Image (tube, rainbow, N blue to C red):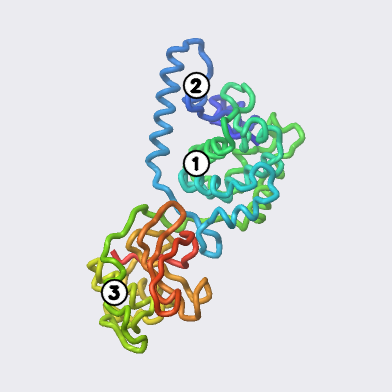
């Protein structure tokens, strides 16, 4: 059903869907529940004030990162495979993820509601009005029209946060009674009773609910010496470096990079034992090093055994974060030699933050 602002009449709230009105950017709906009262100057003032308030509220939220239930970060590529036959939502995985992370709403929940409200992206409202959430104009003026589907998805997600997520209504079971109340006047066929199970079904199709797994990656570049300054680039691969790793292995190069950045890292740091790359996340946590799914310049990207890596795992040094991509430097991706790559930020198993 549609997404409303709270109705000021308690008697009407019990019978009408509470998704009927949203806060527009400019207009009388910028103050929740405001009806036209004939004083345009007052309304304009209040609407602008409300719009500014909403904008400031949203701007205060730190961007979140969401992961699938298998602990891998949400990626547009993976979500797009599930949206392939979903009408206008085909190829919109990045839009759903970006809107969800910016507003602090599970992107899978947003996409599931959009699919349910539009018949898998085929309804007239979403095709002609770019309105995926059934957002209504204030005062019952019909469906809102957006300039693009991207804008419609963003506004729907923002509204979800302000009216539901912010107030602890975070699951279909909690959202349903307010979003699509059974017995609502605008639901003469009684379809609202299927809303919760419908949303849960769509979420399952999309891979299940995602969860917050860290803050968004910090963009920027890491500083350091040129890779040619690595002192063991011509050394025997059977030898051991100053940090107790075998020369020209991924672990040796990353150890050098960390020390070059001023971090006194070595294999037995703080009485730990880092060993093979696949063990680094466990050992880092044991000595208090931050480990998460969030990339940052200067962090160590780690691949667990079997995840784009050998049985020993792999580590690399993050030199730059740009959107959903990371640039890395590494050794032994190509046998015993240096290489640079740009990979999806969601590809590594973890990021280790030594500073």
Is residue 269 visible to us here? no
Mark closer to the chain start, 2 or 1: 2
| Quadrant that contains the N terminus | top right
Mark closer to the observer (3, 1):
3
Residue at image point 63% right, 52% down: 203
Cα gap from disc 2 to disc 3, whole angstroms: 61 Å
Q: Secondary structure at mark 3?
A: loop
Q: Secondary structure at mark 2?
A: loop
Q: Which residue is mark 2?
A: 27
In-front residue for pair 192/287: 287
- Left or right for 334, reference 290: right
Disc 2 or disc 1, which is closer to the eye?
2
- Looking at the figure, which quarter contains the C terminus? bottom left
Helix, strand or loop at mark 1: helix
Residue holding disc 1: 161
Looking at the rendering, which quadrant does residue 237 occupy?
bottom left
Q: Position of residue 68 (x, y in %)?
A: 55, 59
CA–CA distance in space, label 2 to label 1: 20 Å
Relative depth, front residue between 99 and 5: 99
Which of the two marks, 2 or 3, is nearer to us in this view? 3
Horizontal side of residue 61 vs 112, given as left or right: left
For disc 3, the marked residue is 230
Q: Is residue 200 above or below residue 35?
A: below
The residue under the point 60% across, 33% down is 19
Between discs 2 and 3, the one toward the N terminus: 2
Quadrant location of residue 230?
A: bottom left
Choose the circle earlier in sequence order: 3 or 1. 1
Q: Is residue 27 above or below residue 257?
A: above
């Amino acid at each position: 059903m549609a997404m409303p602002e709270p109705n000021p009449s308690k008697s009407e709230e019990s019978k009408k869907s509470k998704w009927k009105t949203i806060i527009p950017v400019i207009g009388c709906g910028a103050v929740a529940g405001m009806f036209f009262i004939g004083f345009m100057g007052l309304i304009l003032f209040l609407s602008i004030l409300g719009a500014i308030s909403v904008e400031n509220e949203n701007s205060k939220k730190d961007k979140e990162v969401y992961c699938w239930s298998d602990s891998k970060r949400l990626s547009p590529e993976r979500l797009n495979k599930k949206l392939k036959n979903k009408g206008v939502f085909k190829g919109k995985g990045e839009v759903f993820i970006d809107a969800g992370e910016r507003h602090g709403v599970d992107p899978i929940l947003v996409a599931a509601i959009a699919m349910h409200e539009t018949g898998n992206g085929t309804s007239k409202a979403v095709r002609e009005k770019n309105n995926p959430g059934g957002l209504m104009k204030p005062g019952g003026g019909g469906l809102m029209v957006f300039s693009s589907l991207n804008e419609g998805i963003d506004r729907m997600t923002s509204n979800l946060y302000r009216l539901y997520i912010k107030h602890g209504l975070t699951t279909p079971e909690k959202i349903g009674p307010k979003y699509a109340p059974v017995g609502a006047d605008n639901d003469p066929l009684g379809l609202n009773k299927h809303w919760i199970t419908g949303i849960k079904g769509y979420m399952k199709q999309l891979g299940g609910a995602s969860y917050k797994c860290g803050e968004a990656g910090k963009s920027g570049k890491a500083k350091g010496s040129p890779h040619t300054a690595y002192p063991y680039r011509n050394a025997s691969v059977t030898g051991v470096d100053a940090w107790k790793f075998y020369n020209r292995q991924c672990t040796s190069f990353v150890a050098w990079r960390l020390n070059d950045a001023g971090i006194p890292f070595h294999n037995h740091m703080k009485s730990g034992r880092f060993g093979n790359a696949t063990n680094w996340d466990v050992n880092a946590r044991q000595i208090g090093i931050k480990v998460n799914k969030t990339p940052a310049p200067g962090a160590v990207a780690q691949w667990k055994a079997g995840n784009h890596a050998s049985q020993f795992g792999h580590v690399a040094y993050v030199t730059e974060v740009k959107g959903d991509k990371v640039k890395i430097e590494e050794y032994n991706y190509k046998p015993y030699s240096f290489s640079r790559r740009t990979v999806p930020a969601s590809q590594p198993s973890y990021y280790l933050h030594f500073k």
